[in-house]
Image: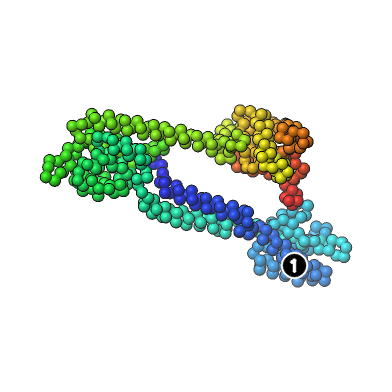
Amino acid sequence: MKILRLGPVSRISMGLVSLAAFLLLTADLLLGLMPDAGDVAKQVRKRTSEALAVQLTALVQTDQIDVLRRTLHAVISRDEEVLSIAVRRASGEILAETGNHEKHWIPPANNKSTITSVVVPISSGKDVWGQVELAYRPPTPQTLIGWLKYPGVSLTLLMLTVGFGVFYLYLRRILQRLDPKAAIPDRIRTAFDALSEGVLVVDKQGHVLLANSVFRGMHPGANVELTGKRIKDLPWLVAAVGEDAEQHPWARAMRDAASVSGETIHIPMEGAEPLKMTINCAPIMDDGNTVRGCLVTFDDLSVVEHMNQALLDSVAQLEVAKKQIEEHNAQLKRIADVDQLTGALTRRAFLNQAQQQFRESAAHRRDVCCVMVDIDHFKSINDRYGHLVGDQAIQHVTKTIQAELCPADILCRYGGEEFCILLPEATVQKAYELAEHIRIQIEAKCGPNVIPGDNVRITCSFGVASVEFGGNTLAEIIKQADQALYVAKNTGRNRTARYDQATNAKTSVRAAA
């Protein structure tokens, strides 16, 4: 099966449009460019329900039950968001209802209204006579088609599609106009000019990227600026290799990703005997074994041995250059994978390693736990002692965490003063005990180590999650650990919260926030 490979222009376009989408979504997250449909629906439904309850209260108090029922039917028929309405006495008896209330009504916890189940009490003097119950449709789509029509999703998809097209067309046009000479370093050009054989370097479309001095002296038609020209636009060379461009030696070498050597051609020379040459073609491959171009040599049969030696020397130079590039790339990868301040993994490197570990654990049905850590009141440390001391605090917290982890555990600086730990093969109880132990160690050691004698306390809050709680993906257990951390910080800090223990407290914590 042939694997679809995207070209450089497509990959760059996808990167740019993804960056643009990320910036748009980040701006929306920070600035609220697109209104939250849930908040808007909640406010509208609250006002509508309260207004309706006032009218229904008046009808109940005057004992106009028929008018009450007609009013309920009128509301259902006019408002598509309302699924059902009922007027219920305090005893639980339903006085009037419409819209199959028994099917749609889901009693909210503690009788507190939700976005889909709204309760408005009806008072009679100082006593509660009963309540009005309204069942609404969910404010967010419940189907794939619905989500595709959702404004935020449709806007993002439109931006990605149109943006990719615009970036692709623009980059394709711009890259065609870039100087092809920049593709070959000057030192490589100099090395090729030193050879005693003619050398051409062409890209996949047949454009000349390099022609050495020997090739330019082979024929009067070659003594021009060749960089950027197509080989098929060189009539003297086409006359020697044939009109069919698909059968040119370099075209076959790139198509088959295999060298073509020892093909003899006769280049016509005006007023002289044809020039007899041997062509050797070698495809140029990148690290992904994708053909990027072709190296073509033209050997004068009388000096084949000499030219072969020169070519070997040039190839050796290319290998040295390639090795230097590989070493430089490896160094850059190390820099990108390790956080320079703490020595822990960066978020990107962590997600790559953790994803692989998570998949292996899932395949073997092994426990996996995630722990989120956040330094308490870190801003006050920076404000009081300065950012240099804040950096030292982060470093000491990192060292304290690393000292307690096993070699298989994965730690990263998730962002700012926040850390994430993946614990393969750890039960939730073991992860909780480890988090508590680390928390105690941080409280006991980090403050005195950062600012000796100042009696400063450095503490951390921990959130623990596990696949035992239903997380099927790495992203889900990280999210669960973050939610547990949120509860830990909002219930006093310097403590450890488990996701299963924190679930019951999430509603009240968010309300308090």
Query: 17 or 397, which is in the foreground?
Result: 397
Query: 100 or 155, which is in the foreground?
Result: 155
- Name the residue rendered at 71%, 45% in the picture: 383
Q: Quadrant of the N terminus?
A: top left
- Name the residue rendered at 30%, 45% in the picture: 208
Rendered image coloring scheme: rainbow
Residue type at tag 1: Ala
Asked whether residue 83 is in view, the answer is no
> In the figure, is residue 327 to the left or right of 52?
left
Q: Is residue 192 above or below residue 71?
A: above
> In the figure, is residue 509 to the left or right of 361?
right
Query: 415 or 359, which is in the foreground?
Result: 415
Q: Position of residue 360 (x, y in %)?
A: 56, 33
Q: Secondary structure at mark 1?
A: helix
- Name the residue rendered at 15%, 44% in the picture: 269
Q: How many marks?
A: 1
Q: Position of residue 125 (x, y in %)?
A: 87, 65
- Name the residue rendered at 74%, 57% in the picture: 113
Q: Position of residue 94 (x, y in %)?
A: 78, 61
> In the figure, is residue 470 to the left or right of 5?
right
Query: 175 or 81, which is in the foreground?
Result: 175
Q: Is residue 457 above or below residue 20?
A: above
Q: Position of residue 474 (x, y in %)?
A: 60, 40
Residue with the most extreme right position: 126
Q: For residue 427, what is the image quadrant?
A: top right
> In the figure, is residue 10 to the left or right of 29?
left
Q: For residue 276, what is the image quadrant?
A: top left
Asked whether residue 376 is in view, the answer is yes
Report crowding for label 1: few under 14, some 14 to 19, many 20 or more residues within 10 A (C-alpha): few
Q: Which residue is mark 1?
A: 51
